[in-house]
Every structure is written in C-alpha cells, then in structure tokens.
C-alpha cells in the first residue's frame, strides 16, 4: 500500500489505533482456541469414548464449553472494537475530505464534477471502512488459521498433511490470476458508477429544463445507456470472479476427500486413532477454508485498492490559490478597488487583456459587454476564485494576493446571476453570511430588495423552508433573496452580477433606490445588460474580447458610436 494511502488510515485513527492493534493481535490468537478445542475433542473420542473412560467426559466437556465461551465473548468484543475503530476512521476521513473540498479553487471543480465527488464521498469511503472492520482482520485470521492448522495437522499425521499441502499452490495461483484479471473491471465499475451518479445529479438539478423541453424520454434513454454499461461491467466482473472461484472451491472439497480417504485408510491400519481421523477430516476444512476466504478477500482487495486510489488525490489535493505566508492587514477598510494592467489566461485562452480601472470608496462601477467578454471572470478575480496571470488587483491599497483569503472575502459581498438558495428557511438564507445578524437587520435587508411583502405571504413568513435552489419561488423572488443575502453582510465591496434580470423595470428601479441608501458607503460593481441598471453608475466600462473597449459615464458613452449606444438604441428606440 502506498505511503500516502497508509497515512490516510493511520492519521484518522488517533485514539483508537492502540485498541485496534490489540484487537488484531487477539484476532490472531482466536484460531489457537480452535486447535485447543480440536485437541480436547480428540481426547474425548480416544480416551472418553473409545477407551470408555466416562469419568473424564464431564471435565472435558466443561473445558470445551469454557474455551468456546471465551472465544465467543472475545469475538463479540473484537467486533465492537473493530467496528468502532472503522467508524472513527471513517468519520475522520470524511471530515478531512469535506474540509479539503471546501478549500479547493475553481480548477478542482472543473476536474471533479459533482457526481464524481459524491461517488467518492460515499461508496469509496465505505470500502475503506470495510477494509478496517472486516478485510484486514480476516486476512490475519485466514493466515494464522492456515499456518497453525498446518502445524497441528503435521503433528497428527505427516503423510496426509503433505498431500493436502500439495493442493494449496493451485489455489494461490488461481487467486493471483484472479487479482490480475478482475481488478481492471472494478476500476471501470467505479468510474461508470460515478458517471451514472453524475447523470442522475444533473437530471435532478435540471428537472425544470427537462420538463420544459419535454425531454424525459431522452433523459431516460441516457440513464438507461449508463445503467446498462454498469450492469454489463458488473456481470463481466462477477463472471470472471466465479470463473476463478469455482475451481478454488473444488480443490477445497477435494482436500476434504483426501483427508477422509487417506486418514480412513490409516485408521483402519491403526496408524492413527479414531479421534485423530475425526480431527484430520474437520481441520482439512480449516486448512482449505482460509484459502477459499483468500479468494474472496483478494477480490475485495481490488475494490478497496481502487477506492483508496480514488480517495487519495482528493484527500491530498492542494489548492493553487492559497494564503500568503505573511498576510497583510490593510490600514483602511474603504473598499477601494484598483485593477492595474490585469490579464487572465485560462487553458491557453486569454480571458482578460490588460484591464485597468479604479473604483473609489462609495462609487459604483458598471460593467457591460457581450456574452463571453470576461465580465464575470473580472469579478471572480477580486474574490481570488482565480489569480491574475499578469498585473495586480488592489483593495484598499493591498494586493488581493497578500490578503488572508478569509479576510479578503469577508470584505466582499456577492450576488451572482446563478442564484443558489439552500434548503433552509428564508431567514436562514438571508443571514447565511452573517449568522449573528439581528432580526431587524434581516427584515431591513428584505425590505431593501422589495422581498418583505412576498415573504409575508408565504406559509410561515421568514421561517418558511424553501426547497433546494429555491424550488417554489419565482425567478424574481429567488433573485431578491440572493440580493438580500448579499447586502445583509454590509461589506465594503458589493458585487452584483446580473442580479435583477428576472425583475420588472419598476421593481428594479425601486430596489436600486433602496440600495443607494442602504449601501451608500459600499463600493459597488454591477454587471448588467439593461441600460436602466447601469446608467446611474459613476463609471461604466464595456468589455469586448477581454479588453476595455469603452469607458465613461452614461452621457459620455452615448456620444460614442459604440456597443453601449447600440444597446441603448435597441432598448429605448424600438
């Protein structure tokens, strides 16, 4: 097992590692109890029954019962210890994985889609739990049982035991071949399961689009295709496993037959006792049983190995955007923003090219431009969701790369065009960024964005639980709640990315007037395509192909024959 993977196990078993190791040691001793029972049973048959020393039977039976009781109690305690250890480890890994995902930047989520992450956080983690609670203890049990049984059978009868031992190499060879042939199928199955999860996740998240376009049959066919591919892989993997498992089981039964025939012949010739014959037959299964178990465990090992290899890159993933070693704390908290010759290149494509502007405290900058011109990327750079390729971005005179990330993002409130609301109460959604906000401030934020009236008409007012992504609300209502969430933070920088597109112009105008008063000290960046949404701004820039093509006030831009004037005429001169 790789060092990194082993470290995942060990580092998440703090507090339970010693009990876990002790449990493994005791598990290794349990097979010796079986041999002790076998020895006592042989003595019962040979001395108590064959030689009719019936006075020995009560004591021998008490010894058998005592040994069995000790084994049963020990086995019960070991199951509890192993289960607790595996659950503790699972808790730690799950916690660290989730924490790792929270710290990742946007590149990470382009690499690992939602369905992929969900698959790794569920079924793959369960295989890691299984490896601790069942797989490793049973490996130890199988090895110790095989070795101790082999030694004991050699003590009883060497010739028959050697014949039985000759049957074991084929089982090992078959299990090794099975490992080579079956593992690739389980790797493909994991990936195909992730693909299937992604189809389901996307379908559920986009159920409105599916229904709007009446593509239920198409989505069902897409799911069936992935489902069929997974079924085929599972059948192929199982068939190959059975192909190897069948001869392994046959060899195990053959070993029992050898013990019966060979031992029986020697018992007839009085070379061994009847008790030894009985133990020879029964322990032939203890010799073959671990080997048959090994076949199943080898199969499970492929699943465990595949699962851990899928967990490892997420567990150890390092974000590209990290805190500086010595973060700088700015001397002021005005929210002044300066772009200094900023360029951004992603995947070989230049998104922004030499962009420069300044927004003073309390000013409003509006950003317009055609689709794909880089507007949203520009605001994402302020939050350090991406880092600039060239140039720098300053907030209150400090490069955003010199801020502590948490402190930087606390200075900025965002309401995006992709509205996301949690399955939570309306109040919980509004105060998401500031959980200690007062009720009065929640109400004030709702009134500022013209959301108070419709909230009052919901079933439980601010305590109404809304569905995932705001199911049950109109587009405009969702936008207003998202906007209320942003302004409730009262951050010095407020970014509004096309947040009023679903509102009528009258409501938008009222909200804008309220925002002027509620956020009068905040520096605002507004991305919009409506002239009515940007005309009041202190400065307007128009992006085209990642460059600033126009810049000025509403009146200044109308004097140009550029994009801004073209949009104005389309919206007002119909």
Image (spheres, rainbow, N blue to C red):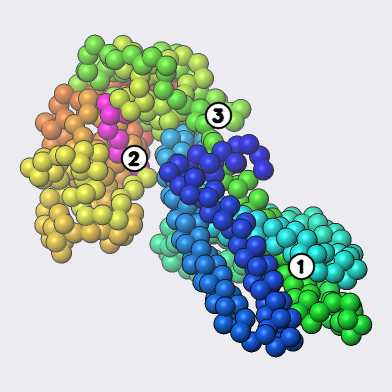
| Foreground residue among 122 and 357 | 122
Region in magenta: 409-417
- Is residue 378 visible in the rendered image? The answer is no
Q: Secondary structure at mark 1?
A: helix
Tell me if residue 59 can be seen.
yes
Residue pointed to by mark 3: 346
> Mark 3: few, some, or many residues within 10 Å (few <14, many ≥20)?
few
Mark sitting on residue 416: 2
Label 3 to label 1, Cα distance in Å? 61 Å
Give the residue displayed 74% in from the left and 81% down from the top. Answer: 46
Q: Secondary structure at mark 2?
A: loop
Q: Is residue 62 left or right of residue 532?
A: right
Query: Badge 1: few (under 14), some or many (20 or more) residues near its Cα, within 10 Å?
Result: many
Q: Closer to us: mark 3 or mark 1?
A: 1
Q: Residue at x 53, y 35 (%)?
A: 317
Circles 3 and 1, Cβ within 8 Å, touching? The answer is: no
Q: Is residue 339 above or below residue 222?
A: above
- Residue 220 on image: x %, y %: 55, 69
What residue would you read off at disc 1? Answer: 287
Q: Is residue 115 left or right of residue 499?
A: right
Asked whether residue 556 is drawn in magenta, I would say: no
Left or right, residue 568 beside residue 116: left
């Amino acid at each position: 097992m790789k060092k990194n993977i082993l470290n995942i196990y060990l580092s998440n078993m703090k507090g339970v590692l010693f009990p876990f190791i002790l449990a493994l040691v005791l598990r290794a001793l349990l097979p010796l109890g079986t041999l002790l029972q076998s020895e006592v049973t042989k003595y019962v048959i040979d001395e108590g029954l064959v030689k009719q020393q019936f006075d020995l039977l009560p004591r021998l039976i008490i010894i058998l019962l005592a040994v069995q009781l000790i084994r049963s109690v020990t086995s019960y305690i070991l199951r509890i210890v192993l289960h607790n250890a595996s659950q503790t480890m699972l808790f730690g890994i799950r916690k660290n994985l989730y924490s790792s995902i929270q710290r990742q930047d946007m590149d990470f989520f382009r690499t690992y889609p939602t369905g992929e992450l969900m698959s790794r956080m569920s079924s793959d983690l369960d295989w890691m739990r299984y490896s601790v609670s069942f797989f490793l203890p049973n490996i130890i049990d199988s090895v110790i049982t095989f070795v101790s049984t082999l030694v004991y059978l050699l003590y009883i009868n060497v010739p028959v035991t050697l014949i039985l031992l000759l049957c074991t190499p084929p089982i090992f060879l078959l299990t090794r071949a099975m490992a080579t042939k079956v593992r690739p199928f389980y790797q493909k199955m994991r990936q195909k399961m992730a693909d299937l999860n992604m189809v389901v996740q996307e379908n559920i998240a986009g159920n409105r689009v599916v229904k709007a376009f009446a593509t239920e049959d198409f989505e069902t066919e897409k799911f069936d295709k992935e489902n069929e591919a997974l079924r085929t892989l599972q059948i192929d993997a199982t068939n190959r496993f059975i192909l190897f498992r069948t001869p392994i089981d046959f060899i195990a039964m053959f070993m029992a037959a050898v013990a019966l025939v060979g031992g029986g012949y020697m018992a007839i010739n009085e070379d061994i006792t009847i008790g030894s014959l009985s133990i020879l037959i029964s322990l032939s299964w203890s010799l073959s049983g671990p080997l048959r178990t090994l076949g199943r465990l080898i199969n499970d090992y492929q699943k465990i190995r595949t699962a851990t290899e899928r967990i490892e890159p997420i567990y150890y993933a390092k974000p590209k955007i990290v805190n500086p070693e010595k973060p700088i704390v700015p001397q002021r908290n005005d929210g002044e923003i300066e772009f200094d010759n900023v360029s951004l290149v992603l995947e070989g494509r230049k998104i922004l090219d030499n962009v420069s502007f300044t927004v003073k405290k309390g000013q409003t900058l509006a950003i317009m431009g055609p689709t794909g011109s880089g507007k949203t990327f520009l605001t994402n750079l302020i939050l350090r969701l991406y880092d600039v390729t060239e140039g720098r971005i300053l907030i209150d005179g400090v490069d955003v790369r010199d801020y502590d990330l948490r402190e930087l993002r606390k200075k900025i409130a965002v309401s995006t065009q992709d509205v996301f609301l949690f399955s939570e109460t309306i109040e919980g959604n509004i105060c998401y960024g500031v959980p200690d906000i007062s009720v009065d401030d929640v109400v004030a934020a709702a009134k500022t964005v013209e959301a108070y009236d419709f909230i009052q008409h919901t079933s439980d007012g601010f305590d109404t639980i809304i569905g995932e992504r705001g199911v049950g609300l109109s587009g405009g209502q969702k936008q207003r709640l998202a906007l209320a969430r942003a302004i409730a933070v009262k951050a010095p920088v407020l970014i509004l990315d096309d947040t009023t597109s679903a509102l009528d112009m009258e409501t938008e105008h009222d909200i804008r007037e309220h925002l002027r008063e509620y956020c009068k000290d905040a520096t605002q960046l507004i991305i919009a395509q409506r002239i009515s949404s940007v005309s009041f701004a202190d400065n307007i820039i128009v992006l085209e192909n990642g460059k600033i093509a126009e810049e000025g006030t509403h009146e200044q831009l109308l004097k140009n024959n550029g994009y801004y004037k073209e949009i104005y005429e389309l919206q007002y001169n119909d």
